[in-house]
Image (spheres, rainbow, N blue to C red):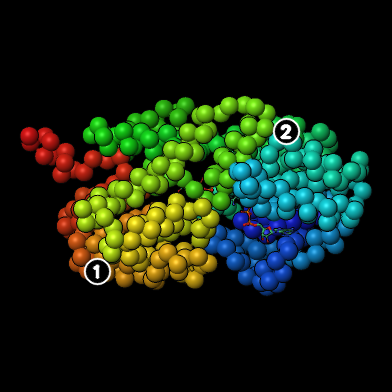
Amino acid sequence: MFARRIVVVGTGYVGLTTGACLASLGHRVLCSDVDTTKVAALARGDVHILEDGLHDLVQEGIAAGRLGFTGDSADAVADADVVFLCVPTPMGSGGAADLAAVESVTREVRDRLPHGCVLVTKSTVPVGTAARVAGLVRRPDVAIVSNPEFLREGSAVHDFLNPDRIVVGSDSQNAAERVAALYSRLGAPTILTDAASAEMVKYAANCFLATKLSYVNAIAELCERLGADITDVTEGMGYDRRIGQSFLQPGPGWGGSCLPKDTHALMQVAEAVAFDFPLLGATISSNTRQRERMVVKVADACGRNGSLAGVRLGVLGLAFKAGTDDLRDSPALAVTRMLAERGAELTAYDPGLRGDEPGLADVVTVVDDPYQAAKGAAGLVLLTEWPEFRTLDWAAMASTMNGPVVVDTRNHLDPDALRRVGVSWHGVGRTPQEALCSAAAA
Ligand SMILES: NC(=O)C1=CN([C@@H]2O[C@H](COP(=O)(O)OP(=O)(O)OC[C@H]3O[C@@H](n4cnc5c(N)ncnc54)[C@H](O)[C@@H]3O)[C@@H](O)[C@H]2O)C=CC1
Ligand SMILES: O=C(O)[C@H]1O[C@H](OP(=O)(O)OP(=O)(O)OC[C@H]2O[C@@H](n3ccc(=O)[nH]c3=O)[C@H](O)[C@@H]2O)[C@H](O)[C@@H](O)[C@@H]1O
């Protein structure tokens, strides 16, 4: 089923990727957004987010006449077959998902949807939202479908075009099949289900991933205390196909625009039906603790008797993970903020950031090369796993530092290579080699 007239409301990481990828699959797509500055830039082919391959795909879609942009969602949907809602569902008061944007777009477009149109929630929304949207639309000729998205930032285009699965849920079998058919060229396993189950798949998956990471971070701490090496431990675990190698990398805690808000939202959903969910609660609180633990690690390695007051530190990476410019709920930024609160003087470098992002300047001085971040620092804290950090001239970095100590919260660097150039390396879940050697000698 090609050349469908599709409207995508919201042109963020998910909406723009959805629009550009569906256009690349041969569909005609019109993307709308309230942010008219963004719409004007996109219409010129200017992509405002760092996402591998997205810029080219947008330009190709525009050039092929299959991809367009507008600031008027109500007008856009007037001759649509399928409308995707890709607007934000941020953490609201008390932790529940804030559905204000989903509801406001629904109200805005409901009377303009043509007969037989399908309205799809692609935003991450709690179980029951499709029913709530149906209640707002109140039109038997418009079917509501839940089609959660599983792409990751930084590899959004790749993930969208190579999905592990497509999940489509609706009370209308016909509408679900029409939405599933849009992806038919991708050849992915497709789960057709009811809307509530589709909505639940999304939260169950994200919260499982968060739980896996909190577990791994806890095992890493245990490794530190017991003299085991988390890198070998996770390798040993990962070969078990029931566990798998991915999502076993310890770090400064998990973050980003989704895992934190979705874990809190599922806690709220559980509470609403009087379900006690201590496992998920511990997943969240362990993550807060992990961020704090990184600060203590830095204070121990670089502070003066554990104090960071007036200590000059360099920071490598501020984004919530490599490959993105997204700072939303970034553990790297959270740790940096806590270091600043403890009085550290911070200079940071992140290859994905310009440095003028809102809120950054209050916390940290952002520089545009890593050697500047290292200059005069009593220690460097690596918080985001950008590949280029591995290939820095570490001897040159160390020579400009005032005490070559690196706290590598991602176990991203080669500890032996760093030690060879005189850097004292501190990772996560890995006992420093010197300590192991002296323990063996004793
Ligand atoms: N970022 C990600 O990797 C993923 C996000 N999701 C979910 O997708 C949804 C969207 O997330 P992102 O794309 O990251 O958000 P985003 O913040 O990057 O983009 C949202 C866009 O919607 C626009 N918008 C807001 N209100 C609007 C309205 N009333 N009418 C038209 N446009 C409006 C904003 O201007 C913005 O351009 C969320 O529910 C999120 O949980 C799901 C999978 C992956
Ligand atoms: O719903 C969403 O928005 C998306 O949330 C996550 O994707 P994303 O937020 O892009 O980031 P991830 O790659 O999942 O990383 C999340 C956090 O976990 C951390 N992480 C990830 C993997 C790992 O092994 N270790 C680790 O610390 C990352 O550094 C990051 O802070 C999910 O992976 C996507 O499937 C989902 O669609």
Q: Where is residue 195 in the image (x, y as percent from the top left)?
A: 75, 35
Nearer the viewer's eye, disc 2 or disc 1? 1
Report the side of 317 relative to 229 (left or right). right
- Cα distance, mark 2 to mark 1? 56 Å
- Pointer 2 with pointer 1, Cβ within 8 A: no
> Is disc 1's CB within 8 Å of ligand 2?
no
Name the residue type under label 1.
Gly
Q: Is mark 2 on a helix, strand or loop?
A: helix
Would you name the residue on which mark 2 appears?
A: 196
- Of all residues, the one furthest to the left in this rendering is 442
- Characterize the local packing of mark 1: few (<14), some (14-19) or many (20 or more) Cα atoms within 10 angstroms: some
- Residue at (55, 36) in percent of width and height: 207
Q: Position of residue 323 (x, y in %)?
A: 48, 57
Name the residue type under label 2.
Ala
For the image shown, how many numbered marks are present on the structure?
2
Would you name the residue on which mark 1 appears?
A: 376
Report the side of 402 relative to 85 (left or right). left
**What is the quadrant of the C terminus in the image?**
top left
- Residue at (73, 64) in percent of width and height: 34
Can see residue 43?
no
Q: Where is residue 435 in the image (x, y as percent from the top left)?
A: 16, 41
Quarter location, residue 308: bottom left
